[in-house]
Every structure is written in C-alpha cells, then in structure tokens.
Image: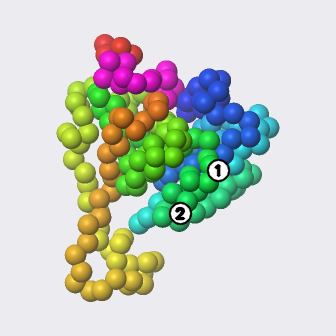
Amino acid sequence: MNLQIGENFLNNLIVQDGDTIFTHCNAGVLATSKYGTATSPMYLSKERGWNIRVYVDETRPYLQGARLTAFELNEAGINVTLICDNMAGMVLSKGKVNEIIVGADRITANGDVANKIGTMSLAILAKHFGVPFYMAAPSNTVELACESGNNIPIEERDINEVTNWFGIRIAPKGIDVYNPAFDVTDASLISAIITEKVIVYPPYTENLCKVFEK
C-alpha cells in the first residue's frame, strides 16, 4: 500500500528527479511500516537513482521530525537537511522547495485534514509562496461520515512536552501552557490528496465522494 502511494507521486510526475521536498513530523517507515506514506516517494526516488533533497522540520514539541524522519532518511542515504520549525518560511521564500508532502491522521468529507500540530501553519506558508502542498495517506484515512474538520476533536498533550527539554525545565514554573497534538488544515490549502488507490484533486467534497462512497 505504501509503495503504491509513492508510485502515484512519481508516475504522475508530482515528484521528479532533481526535486527538493519538504516534510513535517513522521509518516515514514518507523511510524507506518515499509516506505512510509509521506516518505514513500522519497524512498522510491532513491531506488530509481534520482537526485532528490529533503527538508525536514524538527516538529516541536516532541521532535518527531528530528528524531525519526531525519534519522531514517539519513540512514537510507537520502540527502536530508534538518531545520527548526520557525525556519520553514525562510526556506520556502528562497524558492528552495518544489513540493511539500505530509501525512494525514484523518481526512474529512470536505477535504479538511487533521495531522500533527504545525501542518496547518506549513500549509498556509506554502499557499503564500506558491509551493504545492500534498497529503499522502492510505485510503482508510478518509472518513466520509465526518463532514469537516470542525467535527474533529483535538487532543491536548502533557504540558511538560513544552515546559521541559529532555528533563531540563526551560519555562517558568506555574505558567499556562497550550499543547494541542494536532491541527486541521483547510481543504483550500491542499493541492491534492494521494492515496494508494487514487490521486484526488479539488473540489474535494465532490471528488472524495465519487471515489470512496460505497
């Protein structure tokens, strides 16, 4: 399944030889099994002998990008560059990125997508700088029974993820902390949703139903 997601990217020329890709959090081998979802086109590009480069943001506060994605891509011999989350705008503004590819936790009937916190901010930056923004996910991530992102509850995680850095406190004691685990990216910011079955383009309300409604 993950292999087919990657093939849909490459065979439809969404990712091409020489591209620079940006990704967020971890939707790779360590999280989703062989090839990963968002990382599948990266691994396939490597297998085909293509020269690609990948920017990975650290993905605060739990650092899945730095600890997992950057690690596994580097181990695979893929040219990977790690940046802080707040450097994304600078990188995109320089025209260094051909496309952004991220995973998805939930995809609603209207095309809104819930994913790791920071995805929405990255999508807004991509829209501003004219960089295509793609969601890579298995088809069972699509939930037609969920009308929109407004219907998705957002989990809040332990405040210590924000106030502490590997056991060292970095914030004042007693300070209020907001630590949502996910955010919802509006469908209008998404260039396409790529699954193992099909590539879905806007308008999502119509096209997701055509493909996934039984």
In the image: residue 103, left or right of residue 71: left
Q: Which amino acid is tagged 2? A: Met
* Residue at 45% from the left image edge and 23% from the top image edge: 200
Vertical position of residue 207 compared to residue 145: above or below = above
Q: Which amino acid is tagged 1? A: Lys
Q: Residues within 10 Å of mark 1 (few under 14, many from 20)?
A: some
Mark 2–mark 1 distance (CA, rounded to whole Å): 12 Å
Q: Nearer the viewer, residue 33 or 8?
A: 8
* Residue at 44% from the left image edge and 64% from the top image edge: 60
Image label count: 2
Could you say whether the residue bearing mark 1 is in a helix, strand or loop? loop
Asked which quadrant contains residue 61, the reply is bottom left
* Residue at 23% from the left image edge and 31% from the top image edge: 146
Vertical position of residue 74 compared to residue 11: above or below = below
Q: Residues within 10 Å of mark 2 (few under 14, many from 20)?
A: few
Residue behind mark 2: 87
* Quarter placement of the C terminus: top left
Residue 7 lies, in percent from the top left, at 62, 27
In the image: residue 150, left or right of residue 141: left
Tell me, yes or no, whether the highlighted magenta stretch contains residue 135. no
Extent of the magenta region: 194-209
Residue behind mark 1: 96
* Residue at 58% from the left image edge and 63% from the top image edge: 83
Q: Is residue 131 visible?
A: yes
Mark before the other along the chain sequence, 2 or 1:
2
